[in-house]
Structure formats: C-alpha cells, structure tokens
Image (cartoon, rainbow, N blue to C red):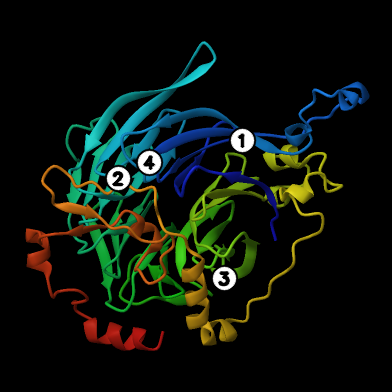
Amino acid sequence: MSDTLLTIETEGTVTAVCASPTNSLQLCYATIIKNFVIRELVPPEQLSDSEIDSEDIDFENKLKPHSEVIFKQVMDDVIRQIHWDEKEIVLAMRSKVLICTLSEEESVLKLNEKTSIDVKQPISKMLVSDDHYIIGTDEGDIFVFKRSNTQKPFKHITDAADYISDMDLTANCFAATSGDGSVYIYDENFKKLDSNATEDFDFTAVRIIGDKVVVGTNNNRILIYKVDNAALPCQIVKQPAEIEFIQRYQNFFLVGLSSGQLRGLLEQPLKDIGIMATTQKKPLMVGAGNCDQSLFYTGGADNRIFVLNFGWLLDEGEQGAADLVHEGLQNGIGADQGFIPKNEPEQIVVNEEEEEENEESELTELAELSSDVTDSDDSDDENGKYVKKIIKPGHLASDSSFSDFFKFEKTEKSKKQKTREGTYGKGEQHAEKKEFFKGL
C-alpha cells in the first residue's frame, strides 16, 4: 500500500492534472476557478550544523518535502483536461482546445498559444496521440483532428447518444465510452467494429489491453469486453464504489473510486489486487503518473492533490523521484504536518458482501461529506443555449461525478436528441443484454 509523500493544497477543486513528460518532479493542474498551475516538488535539504543554528533558516520547508509554484496563469475558462508532451501542452476548455508551447524567457516560464480548435460543443473528454487530437463532447460527438492539420476534422463520429465519458487509443484499436451505457469500438482508421448498449448504468472509463476493452461503470463494476465481440462482457470485476477513472500504470491499472480508494487491477490476468492507497472519503476525480513511474498524483474533489509514493514498484536498484522526495524522512521528519506518516498506514480489508449490504449508508455519508461548488462560472453562452449545472464535487446521485462538474443542461432539444429519443439500448441482442445485466 502506497503512502502519501506530500499533499498539495490548491486554490479550488482540481479539474485536471498532468505530469511533465521530462521532469519527474514537475506537474501541472487546473482548478475550477480557471487557474492553470505548474509546480515542482522539492525534497528536504541536508543542512550543515551552522545552518541549523542560524535563525534565518526556513525550517518549515527546508526539512520536509514541499512544492513550489513555478508558473501560474488565470485562463479565460475552466480547463477540463490537460495533455503535456515534449512538443506541446494541450488544454481542453469549454468548447475549445488550446494548443500551446512552454518557453522560458529570462528564467520566467511563458505559455504561448500556438493554435486552437473550436468544436462549438461542450467538451467532455480529450485524447492526444502522436498523430491525432481526439475530442469527445457532451452531445456524444467525437471529432478527430490530425496534428498536422487542425483546420477541419479528419473524422466526425456521431454514434453515441450521450456525453463521451472516456476514450483510449492503441496502435490497432480506438474505444470510447458514453453516458448512454455504451462502449464503441473502432479500428485504427476509426472505422466502427462493434458496440454494446444498455440502459442499466453509465460507462465512466475505458482502457484497451491487447484484444480486450476494460470498462468502468457507475454501478461499482469493471466490465471486460472482447474487441471482436462486445455484445456481452466476458469478465466482471466487482469494486466497492463507483469507478471515476482507470489509469494505466507500469504493468497494471490504477482505478480511482468515488469512495476515495485507489485500487489496483492486474493486466495479465485481469484481476483486482486490492487497495493501493486510501487518501480521503471524497471521489478521486483525477489521476496521473510522473515520467519515471515512481509517483502518482490523484485527488481533486476537496482542493487537494495527493502525491503518492510508488517507488517501491520500481526494479531493484532503480531510483526514481519518489526516493529523492522521500530522502531524509525515514525518522518521521514532517510527519506531524501530515506529509508522511511515522508508521505504516493501516491496512484496510474490504469485505465486498458487507460493502454491498451497506451501500446506501456509505453513499449517504459520502454525499454529506461533499462540499458545494462556489467557484463556478455560471454565465450563459452567446445564444443562451447552455446553462451551467451547479452540483457538489463527487455528487453521487449523478451519473458521473467528473462529467457532471461540467454538465450542461439544454433549454431546448437538439435535432440529434429528437431523432434518437427513445432509442437507447436498442440493438440486435437487446433482450439478451437486459436479462444478462438484470442481476448485476
């Protein structure tokens, strides 16, 4: 079980987090109050005897790990997702994607906007590959742009009937999940191969592993589908709470839950390996690993980012950023400030039968622990078509706590909705699927 090396207090609810592609101690994040921030983790310093005796030494920061803001900018809108690679920083906002570069002028970082993509729909999810910008919307549309040409979409996919909750791409396959309870599977050229639809629950996360698609739901289940036959899941893995995200990490998956647990899922074979970390009782809405895979950043729902130590998973003799941040803390220095526990964290054993029996009381407790969003831009757009829906972070009565942060309620139905109204869950094997999912 991983310990928390550092807790970063943020200015508002965290909407996105991403790690530097080259610096294992740098991360960036965005908040609900439109801030974009880059921080650098700073390990404890080794002080000489003379420095320790000095009255001018800042012991508050010198003797424990902390983080320093190295860049901060207030944006025009809330950032919903961040991609950071060696070429660009890509920021998904309300209906526009900003493609930027980061430069340094006289030791000061500067964010330079290179170009932008306007899809004219509220954006729910973004995926950036070596060749493409892929944008999912609240309308259920998916726009695929080539990185070499952002003027018009290379593909426009309109299969989903509700918001796109997650997407994943490999060399041979592209998959997207939707709030309509569907997973849509495409080949490498974005030609549809298969799909599955059900009215029973929302699909909230997706990852592709080999010839299988791993799907998270708001019904406390992880469903595994075969790429060539997605009619019914070939495997089901129970979880104690709603799945908020699934993140590939080293040779397994990290699963963030609405209960605040971070659990592990083996790739081969696909199997739950239990709790990897417990940080809070609020949903883990965001997650990202640093470039050397020794740190994992998660949290978001209560104005905090937790820096988790996964250095113990590295190969023997290999040193990562976690070792650097942790250095000097074996004796519990800084433990009373809550940066690192003096003792090993308590092992928590989950009894799945008890979890299911007490599900209602747990959800009520979690809902009460959530705090209202006060830092929200509730202005209408130019046409007055969309109105911001103000809810609690990790609102458990909603279909998806992360998506609902940026959910827009329509004042009038679109042509697409009117056309598709009443068609959810219909397919060749609809009756068979309904019967299959009835007992879940």
> Residue flagged by tag 2: what amino acid is it?
Ile
> Residue flagged by tag 1: what amino acid is it?
Ser
Q: Quick check: can you spot residue 111?
A: yes
Q: What whole-number distance in Å separates the C-alpha atoms at marks 1 and 3?
A: 29 Å
> Residue flagged by tag 4: what amino acid is it?
Ser
Question: Of marks 3 and 4, which one's residue comes earlier in the chain?
Answer: 4
Q: Residue 124: give x, y in percent of width and height.
A: 30, 52
The quadrant holding residue 55 is: top right
- Foreground mark, 2 or 3? 2
Q: What whole-number distance in Å separates the C-alpha atoms at marks 2 and 4?
A: 8 Å
Q: Quick check: can you spot residue 238?
A: no
State the mark number for residue 271.
Answer: 3
State the mark number for residue 129.
Answer: 4
Callout 2: SS = strand
Q: Is residue 379 left or right of residue 22?
A: left
Mark 1, residue position: 24
Mark 2, residue position: 134
Q: Is residue 47 left or right of residue 139?
A: right
